[in-house]
Image: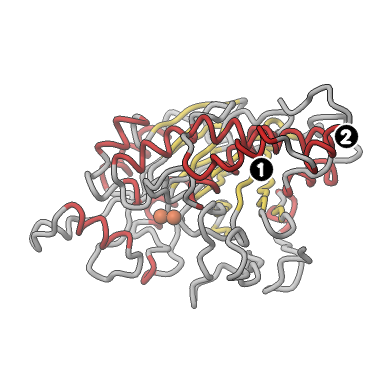
C-alpha cells in the first residue's frame, strides 16, 4: 500500500518541504478524528517507506534473518501472524499518546509484506474498561488489513464483567484450526468475587483490579468451568497436532503480588501436557518474557503503552532480560511483533521494539535449550 510513482528524490523533497496543505494536515492532528488521523499519518509514513528513507524498525529483521530466501517466506515457515497487545486506551481522543501508539502498531502491521495471516490482540485494549475506551480501541483495530483475533485482559473486563467486550468482540474463549495448527483462546483473567461482600461499585472493582498490586483483589484463574471446557474440547484434537494457546496472563506462576500469575496454572498445564507441541502466547506482562515448563513454551508480548519492569523474583531462566527502558523515551520498551510458525509447529517469536533493536527468540533456541547472550543484556541498541 506504500508504493507509489514518486521518485526517491521527489519524496525526500516532499518530506523536507511540506506543502501548506500538508502542514495544515499535520497541525490538525491535535484534534482530528480517527479516519483523518490515519489518512495523515499513513500518508507520511507511506511516503517515507516507499522511498526507503526508513522502515518500521523491527521489520528490517525480515530481510536480515532470511536474506538467502526468496522474497517472502523461508521454506520452513508455514505461516506467520502478527501481534499487538496491551494498548491500555483512555478515551481521550486520537492525540493521547496511547492512542497514537496503538495507531503506530496498526501502521506497522499493515506495512508487513507479505501480510500476516491474522493479527492476535493479547488483551488490555482499554485502561478502565469504559465503553468509550473499548470503542476507541475497536475503531483503531478496525483499520488492520488482516483478520483480527481478540482476547480480553483484566482492564477490558472488571467494570461490567465483560459485557461490552463480548458485545463488541464475541466469545472470550474459542478455538480454530489454521494450516495444521490448532489454536485455542481462553479467558485467563477470571477472579473470584471479591467485590459483592465488600459492596464495591463497578468503578471501584475495576480500579482495584487495574491496581495490579492491589491486594484487595483475587488472583487470576482460568476457572473450573473453563478448564472443563478446555479439557472436553481438546479431547477431540489429535495430540500430534501442534497447539498454540492464547491467554492474557501467563499460564504459569511468575510473581503473585503483581498478578503475573494464573492461580490454576498447574491444572491448565496438565490439560495441555499430553500434546506433543504446545506454545502459549500471552499478554499482560509488557516485556520480553520466555519460559518453558515440560513441553510447553511460553512467550510474552510487548505492550504498545508501557513496559513493566521485571518482577523482583520468579523470572524464568529462559528469559533474556530487557535492559531497563529509558524513562525519557516514551516508546522505549514498547512495540509489537509477529510469530512465525514453522511447519513442525514450533515458533519464532519476534519482538519488534520501537526504540531498540529487535529481538527474536527462535524455535531452534527453545528446542535446544540454549538461550544466547548473557542474562541482563538484550543486545546493542540505538
Ligand atoms: Fe496490560
Ligand atoms: Fe493485564
Residue 34 image offset from top left, x and y in percent: 48, 34
Residue sitting at x 38%, y 49%: 90
Q: Classify 138 as above or below 364.
A: above
User: In front of the other: label 2 or label 1?
Assistant: 2
Residue 245 image offset from top left, x and y in percent: 49, 42
- Image quarter for residue 201? bottom left
The quarter of the image holding the C terminus is bottom right
- Image quarter for residue 73? top right
For residue 326, side relative to residue 162 (left or right): right
Residue found at the very far front of the displayed protein: 20
Label 1: which residue?
346
Give the number of marks. 2
Label 2: which residue?
69
Q: In the rendering, which numbered label is found on residue 314?
A: none
- Using the numbered discs, state the Cα–Cα distance from disc 2 to disc 1 in whole angstroms: 19 Å
Tell me the SS state at disc 1.
Answer: loop
Residue sitting at x 56%, y 44%: 278
Residue sitting at x 60%, y 58%: 331
- Dot 2: few (<14), some (14–19), or many (≥20) neighbours within 10 Å? few
Disc on the earlier residue, 2 or 1: 2
Amino acid at each position: 500500500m506504500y508504493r507509489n510513482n514518486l521518485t526517491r528524490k521527489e519524496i525526500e523533497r516532499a518530506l523536507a518541504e511540506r506543502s501548506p496543505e500538508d502542514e495544515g494536515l499535520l497541525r490538525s492532528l491535535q484534534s482530528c478524528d480517527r479516519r483523518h488521523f490515519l489518512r495523515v499519518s499513513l500518508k507520511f509514513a507511506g511516503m517515507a517507506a516507499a522511498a526507503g528513507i526508513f522502515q518500521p524498525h523491527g521489520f528490517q529483521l525480515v530481510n536480515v534473518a532470511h536474506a538467502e530466501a526468496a522474497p517472502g517466506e523461508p521454506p520452513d515457515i508455514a505461516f506467520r501472524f502478527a501481534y499487538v497487545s496491551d494498548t491500555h486506551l483512555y478515551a481521550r481522543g486520537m492525540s493521547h499518546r496511547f492512542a497514537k501508539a496503538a495507531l503506530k502498531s496498526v501502521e506497522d502491521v499493515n506495512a508487513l509484506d507479505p501480510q500476516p495471516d491474522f493479527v492476535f490482540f493479547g488483551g488490555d485494549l482499554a485502561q478502565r474498561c469504559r465503553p468509550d475506551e473499548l470503542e476507541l480501541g475497536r475503531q483503531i483495530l478496525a483499520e488492520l488489513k488482516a483478520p483480527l483475533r481478540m482476547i480480553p485482559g483484566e482492564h477490558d473486563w472488571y467494570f461490567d464483567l465483560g459485557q461490552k467486550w463480548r458485545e463488541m468482540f464475541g466469545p472470550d474463549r474459542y478455538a480454530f484450526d489454521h494450516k495444521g495448527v490448532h489454536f485455542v483462546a481462553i479467558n485467563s483473567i477470571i477472579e473470584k468475587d471479591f467485590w459483592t461482600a465488600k459492596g464495591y461499585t463497578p468503578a471501584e472493582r475495576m480500579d482495584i483490579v487495574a491496581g495490579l498490586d492491589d491486594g484487595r483483589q483475587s488472583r487470576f484463574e482460568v476457572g473450573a468451568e473453563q478448564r472443563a471446557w478446555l479439557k472436553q474440547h481438546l479431547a477431540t484434537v489429535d495430540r500430534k497436532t501442534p497447539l498454540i494457546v492464547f491467554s492474557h496472563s501467563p499460564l504459569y506462576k511468575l510473581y503473585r503480588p503483581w498478578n503475573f500469575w494464573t492461580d490454576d496454572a498447574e491444572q491448565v498445564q496438565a490439560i495441555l501436557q499430553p500434546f506433543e507441541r504446545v506454545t502459549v502466547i500471552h499478554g499482560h506482562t509488557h516485556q520480553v518474557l520466555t519460559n518453558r515448563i515440560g513441553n510447553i513454551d511460553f512467550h510474552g508480548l510487548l505492550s504498545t503503552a508501557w513496559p513493566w519492569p521485571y518482577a523482583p523474583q520468579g523470572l524464568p531462566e529462559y528469559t533474556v532480560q530487557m535492559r531497563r527502558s529509558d524513562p525519557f523515551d516514551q516508546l522505549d520498551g514498547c512495540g509489537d511483533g509477529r510469530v512465525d510458525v514453522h511447519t513442525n509447529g514450533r515458533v519464532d517469536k519476534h519482538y519488534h521494539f520501537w526504540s531498540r533493536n529487535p529481538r527474536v527468540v527462535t524455535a531452534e533456541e527453545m528446542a535446544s535449550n540454549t538461550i544466547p547472550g548473557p542474562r541482563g543484556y538484550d543486545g546493542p541498541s540505538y
